Amino acid sequence: MCGIYGTTINYNKAEIEAKLNRISFRGPDKMGISQLKSGDNIVSLGHNRLAIIDLDPRSNQPFMYNEAIHIVFNGEIYNYQDIKQSLINKGYIFNTTSDTEVICAAYMEYGEECVNYFNGMFAFVIFDAKKQILFGARDRLGKKPFYFFHKGKNFEFSSQVSSIQLFNNNLSISQKSINSYLSWGNIPDPDTIYNEVKKLKAGYSFTFNLDSGSYKHKQYWDIDFNGDNLFTGSYEEAKEELESIVTNAVKIRLFADVPVGIFLSGGIDSSLVAALATKSTNEKVKTFSVKFNTKGFDESAYAQKVASHLQTDHHIIECNYNEGMDLIENLCEYYDEPFADSSAIPSLLLSKYTKKHVTVALSGDGGDESFLGYHRYNWMRYIQNAYNMPNFARNILVNGLNMIPHYKSKVIANVLNHKTQNDAYLGMMANTKKPWLENVPDLEFLEEKNIYTIITKTFLNGYQILI
């Protein structure tokens, strides 16, 4: 994890340092600042580095390539060595072993289409001095954050909204975003807690013209919601291809010039990652899990079983009450807009102690959506029969459940009260019927809505799209 920052606003160096210090926890290895004057324009770039590939200072950022290309980059390009070899064959020369330099060369060769060549998680911005533009992009699924402020010729971007907020007293709280947060526990792209600050959406790139102040973005990737590339092989062939894809995905993420470990909860997602990691390396894999004193929240026993089976070098971190409270009190230092994921606290604790052993840790985020690891998938399967009933029969069932003085009965009744099973699922995801909401949020932006258009999808695999 690194932190990137940049602006065309005429902040002085001390102010830019303060903005970078605000997010210094993202990159403790090196802070770098470049203030570049080009014609009538001034561009300031900043970077907090967590060194993972090519630890040499030559790869510190902001990074300059061929004297006209300047970049700040957060993330990892997993296939950078293949891209690099292709560019070497075209005559490009490299002075580092970093993926940062490869992004610059790829931009020079392919222009804005370079993003289509990158397999990775990334948020980067290139200052092209010849064209007097900023060009940037965010990875396909939005693993890396990217916030920006744009007003006229003033443009500012950062890995976190708090850097943009610092020294900017003209930001106003978004009531729409508060409503969204109360509905599903976060603020969906492209909105933020401030009306004037936006997120670059996942799978999008942008250009900002320094001379005119114009900002344009475009989508370079999206999920195939139309089903144009459906798999046509057999079930056995599908399993083999899936195993190959996931195995390769884990393997390429293990490459680093620093120690790598795995967050292991014992669930489907992290257990799969740990299992494939042990197959992909001859070294003993380091795994880490959190232990809670409250039995209802403690999953460490499952993690221990998986670790024992895989024979990993397993570490258990115990979360006590006082340490948990300290993390809650300081949560806003790391999450600087409303965010209500209950896993945030154990994730912070896990990261804090894991840093003593490894620099990079893989997690299973996204695996539960792909491999049906959440209880909601079973819920939807259980209520499928109820939605096969005639409406009057389901209404009788709902009324009967509401008469039972038990919380779970009323929850089930609320789910069944939706018009269709699709609406019931979205209602479970978004909690749109909360009594404190002034308005019912618009669900049209949800990726799940698009999956309904793929009529070839079955019920279970139709809901494996993450939001």
Image (cartoon, rainbow, N blue to C red):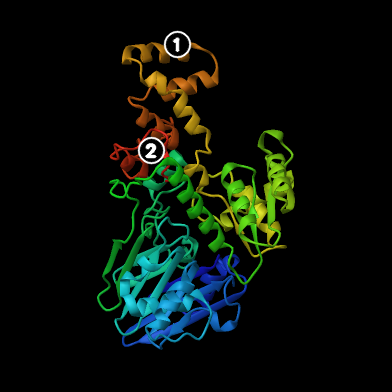
Residue at screen point 40% across, 47% down: 177
Name the foreground residue: 270 vs 172: 270
Within the image, what quadrant is residue 259 found in?
A: bottom right
Crowding near the residue tagged with mark 1, few <14, some 14–19, many ≥20 C-alpha atoms within 10 Å: few
Q: Which mark is residue 462?
A: 2
Badge 2 vs badge 1, beta-carbon distance below 8 Å:
no
Q: Position of residue 411 (x, y in %)?
A: 49, 23
Relative side of 62 to 257, left or right: left
- Between 91 and 323, the residue placed more toward the observer is 91
Comparing labels 2 and 1, the label whose residue is closer to the camera: 2
Q: Is 17 drawn above or below residue 288 in the view shown?
A: below
> With respect to residue 422, does 259 lie above or below?
below
Q: What is the three-letter code of the residue carrying label 2?
A: Gly
Q: Which residue is mark 1?
A: 400
Q: Is residue 11 visible?
A: no
- Left or right: residue 307 versus residue 219 is right
Q: Quadrant of residue 299?
A: top right
Q: Where is residue 242 shown, x and y percent of the image?
A: 47, 49
Element assignment for label 2 = helix
